[in-house]
Image (spheres, rainbow, N blue to C red):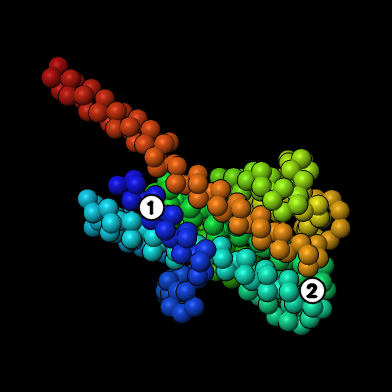
């Protein structure tokens, strides 16, 4: 059935690349509404309530995915179809690149009001006072980080854990966006969701950084500079994962990211990543090409994993379990 999972990942990626997110009835939006309803019922300003909220909100999609895997056992076509549907539902690569392109076109036309309005489709910063370099910086940083969140991480978790991995990762990442940010309401309640998202993105974010370095020449970038900046600056970001992606993109594009950000009246000042000028409209098509290339490379790794390392790990696990059973049997005979 590994081949069915691989086929589902590839098919779902292809659908996302061709048509993007569903315009209506998006499953992730439905999950968000359900999670909001649950929050209203169990919210308390403490971590225990946040942990229960996170466990229920993530556990339900994981259980749904596991049930679908059990229901399609021995039916490769059905297994491939449900994995493809799940992959399409959780990926956001085409939409991410499209939003960057639309914002970049507005900047190129000098239409700052339109660009400011569009920024909300990419991130939660207050765009009201941002000029072209700051709008371009926000877009570049968002594409860099969300290439990991919306493409690399889902594919990796889908390869490792099938449909439960796909749905569970997207649930955790969505919860982090909903309650994982710093605010008086979510300072404690949102901590479990934020920590779970950090854990699930630890490996994908670093892979995103390495792949960004590798594909930098496809966007007229310098691979050596991307490597140097990634190694130097990746741990300067307050997020344990976002800096991995942003530092690599800063080096690949030869720009400087970081600085002062405003979120609903809350100001964050972040260290600078990279060297050179601030981004401009011309950098957005380049970061979109990097994002597309990183996604395609990750798809190749995700497709190979179940048939290589995944098969080896399964064989080792079965042997270990068999050895443990035999030792227990010999112990009883004595």
Q: Position of residue 78 (x, y in %)?
A: 27, 59
Q: Is residue 184 left or right of residue 286?
A: left
Q: Quadrant of residue 27?
A: bottom left
Q: Is residue 301 left or right of residue 246?
A: left
Q: Quadrant of the C terminus?
A: top left
Local crowd size for mark 2, using a 10 Å CA cut-off: few (<14), some (14–19), many (≥20): some
Q: Secondary structure at mark 2?
A: helix
Q: Position of residue 35 (x, y in %)?
A: 44, 71
Query: Which residue is pictured at 78% across the width and 57% down the height?
Result: 257
- Regarding residue 48, the answer to whether it shows in the image is no
Q: Quadrant of residue 56?
A: bottom left
**Any mark on residue 233, and which?**
none
Query: Which residue is pictured at 75% across the width and 77% down the height?
Result: 106
Q: Position of residue 42 (x, y in %)?
A: 43, 71
Q: Position of residue 125 (x, y in %)?
A: 70, 71
Name the outermost residue toward the right.
Answer: 277
Labelled pair 1, 2 in contact (Cβ < 8 Å): no
Query: Which residue is pictured at 70% across the width and 80% down the height?
Result: 117
Q: Secondary structure at mark 1?
A: helix
Residue at which label 1 appears:
7
Residue at which label 2 appears:
108
Q: Is residue 147 left or right of residue 328?
A: right
Q: Nearer the viewer, residue 334 or 260?
A: 260
Query: Which residue is pictured at 34% across the width and 47% down the height?
Result: 3
Q: Nearer the viewer, residue 17 or 233?
A: 17
- Residue 196, above or below 142: above
Q: Earlier in the sequence, mark 1 or mark 2?
A: 1
Local crowd size for mark 1, using a 10 Å CA cut-off: few (<14), some (14–19), many (≥20): many
């Amino acid at each position: 059935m590994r081949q069915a999972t691989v086929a589902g990942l590839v098919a779902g990626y292809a659908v996302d690349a061709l048509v993007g997110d569903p315009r209506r009835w998006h499953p992730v939006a439905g999950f968000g509404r359900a999670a909001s309803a649950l929050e209203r019922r169990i919210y308390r300003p403490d971590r225990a309530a946040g942990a229960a909220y996170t466990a229920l909100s993530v556990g339900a999609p994981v259980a749904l995915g596991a049930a679908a895997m059990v229901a399609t056992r021995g039916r490769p076509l059905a297994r491939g179809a449900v994995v493809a549907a799940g992959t399409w539902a959780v990926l956001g690569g085409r939409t991410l690149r499209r939003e960057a392109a639309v914002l970049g076109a507005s900047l190129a036309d000098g239409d700052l009001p339109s660009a400011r309005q569009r920024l909300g489709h990419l991130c939660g910063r207050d765009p009201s006072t941002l000029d072209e370099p700051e709008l371009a910086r926000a877009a570049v940083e968002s594409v860099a980080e969300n290439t990991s969140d919306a493409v690399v991480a889902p594919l990796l978790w889908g390869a490792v854990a099938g449909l439960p991995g796909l749905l569970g990762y997207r649930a955790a990442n969505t919860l982090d966006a909903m309650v994982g940010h710093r605010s008086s309401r979510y300072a404690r309640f949102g901590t479990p969701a934020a920590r779970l998202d950090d854990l699930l993105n630890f490996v994908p974010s670093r892979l995103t950084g390495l792949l960004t370095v590798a594909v930098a020449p496809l966007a007229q970038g310098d691979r050596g500079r991307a490597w140097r900046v990634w190694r130097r600056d990746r741990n300067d970001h307050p997020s344990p994962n976002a800096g991995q992606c942003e530092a690599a993109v800063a080096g690949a594009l030869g720009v400087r990211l970081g600085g002062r950000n405003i979120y609903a009246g809350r100001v964050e000042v972040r260290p600078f990543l990279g060297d050179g000028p601030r981004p401009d409209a011309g950098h957005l098509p380049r970061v979109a090409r990097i994002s597309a290339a990183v996604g395609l490379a990750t798809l190749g790794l995700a497709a190979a994993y179940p048939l290589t390392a995944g098969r080896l790990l399964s064989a080792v696990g079965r042997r270990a379990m068999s050895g443990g059973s035999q030792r227990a049997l010999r112990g009883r005979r004595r």
